[in-house]
Amino acid sequence: MRNLTIGKPLKLIVLFTIPLLIGNLFQQLYSFMDALIVGRTIGKDALAAVGATSSIVFLIIGFAQGTTAGLSILTAQAYGAHDYRRVRRSFGTSIWITVGISLILTVAAVTMTRPLLTVMQTPPDIMDGSIAFVRVIYFGIIASMSFNLLSNMLRALGDSRTPLFFLIIATIINIVLDFWFILGFHSGVAGAGYATVSAQVIAALLCWIYIRMRIPLLMIRRRDLRFDWHDIVQHLKVGLPMGFQMSIIAIGAVILQVMLNTLGTNAVAAYTAAGRIDQLATLPSASFGVAMATFAAQNLGAKEYGRIRRGVYQTLMVNVGLSAVLGVVIILFSKPLVNLFLGPNQPAVTALAQTYFHFNASMYWLLAILFTIRNLLQGLGQTLVPTVAGFFELGMRAFAAIFLVVPFGFAGASAANPLAWFGSVLVLVSSYVRTMRRIRQQEDELALKKRLIDRQRVSPLASVKRFLRVHALLNAFTGAEICT
């Protein structure tokens, strides 16, 4: 466990981010390897079938991940305040919420799979494969939510290394099972889903065993699992907005996917391959964002307002600079990166993917600002503004899908993400400025209170010292008179 309320802010954030980055890298390797193995072993249509479901998978899984991340914010605040009983209560309440949401999402998602894909105008030649893949993923929602909850709880306590260890194990298992199900059992596209869900189940079990054996602070008892509506409502106030925010973003992606599907299988395959690389390239900025949320939450609990201001400013500088460099690298090496998925024999698909990168990779620096500020606000318990920013992302993606795809084709679809990032940042920056002013005021008020308390503590001692000095002078004067 790592206390983020003591020490140099940037150093702590970077050290906390590195395991997060590696962990997120391995987590993205789930989808990356699924796409790579499916594309190379089954073919272009199978790759397109996986890609056509990415937006509706993110619609549900993104909500689950966002909700569990929100639940852990309250745990981090309790840990920063050294209220360890509240830490365990927060964990127990989060377990109830996770189980309930998992059941609701599973039933709703599995039931709506075919209607959603039909509304999205999924090409008929990839419809069956898309349904087979996504239904397996949806049946594994409980595994995904469980692992994300346990990982986020560990991160709330400052431990970003242990979730990384389990992610590495899960990724290796996923890759092995991909080949086993697809090539060994000839399970087709569904085999990639079986591999992913199986790996998540194993990772969740390992994480739970570790917590039971090594983290006494999260050793919940029966009283910590007491069903308390007040606690549940407090956690839902933070968790649900973060989950809905992810779903709002995903709805924009679904609208875009509908228009993308009208451009044909080549466009879907190109967007899928480029999107997988895009996800990997933006992991550093996303990881800094997650670290910022935990850092802000712990320091808010500890009332270390000055550290919050310094931490976010330094993180912004590093995140924006690193993202700009990565954008240049991706643009320069886009062709060989795309060829990893389909080989060099699909020049039309590769050309489309390169178009995607010219729009997206050149704007990674803007996404870095979005991730840092949005997670800062969430770590401080603010949910309204990030949710509004999510609606702006939805609006921008919908605008690109409706008004840009038809006249500009794939280029119009590729412009959707940068437009969405720009719309979101416009909302977040104004809130960020107001929040920093408020934090500065709280810092000044706390400093004033400390000075007053210090004066009260020092005043009696100062009075005694003054009395002793006066007494000594009187003795010296009296002694002098006697001598004369």
Image (cartoon, rainbow, N blue to C red):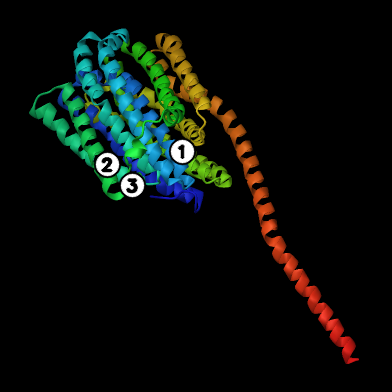
Disc 1 is placed on an element classified as helix
Comes first in the chain, label 1 or label 3: 3
Quarter of the rendering occupied by the C terminus: bottom right
Q: Which mark is residue 207?
A: 2
The residue that mark 1 highlights is 293
> Residue at coordinates 22% horizontally, 15% vertically from top-left?
131
Question: Residue 194: x, y in percent?
Answer: 18, 27
Residue type, numbered disc 2: Cys
Question: Residue 96: x, y in percent?
Answer: 34, 30
> Residue at coordinates 15% horizontally, 23% vertically from top-left?
42
Q: Is residue 100 above or below residue 283?
A: above
Comes first in the chain, label 2 or label 1: 2
Comes first in the chain, label 2 or label 3: 3
Depth check, front residue: 201 or 356: 201
Cα gap from disc 2 to disc 3, whole angstroms: 12 Å
> Residue at coordinates 55% horizontally, 25% vertically from top-left?
427
In the rendered image, which quarter is residue 114 located in? top left
Depth check, front residue: 342 or 141: 141
In the rendered image, which quarter is residue 133 located in? top left
Q: How many marks?
A: 3
Q: Residue 138: tell me if it is visible.
A: yes
Q: Are marks 2 and 3 in contact (CB under 8 Å)?
A: no
Depth check, front residue: 281 or 184: 184
Q: Are marks 1 and 3 in contact (CB under 8 Å)?
A: no
The residue that mark 3 highlights is 161
In the rendered image, which quarter is residue 122 located in? top left
Disc 2 versus disc 1: nearer the observer: 2
> Residue at coordinates 38% horizontally, 31% vertically from top-left?
331
Q: Are marks 2 and 1 in contact (CB under 8 Å)?
A: no
Q: Residue 291: tell me if it is visible.
A: no
Depth check, front residue: 122 or 112: 112
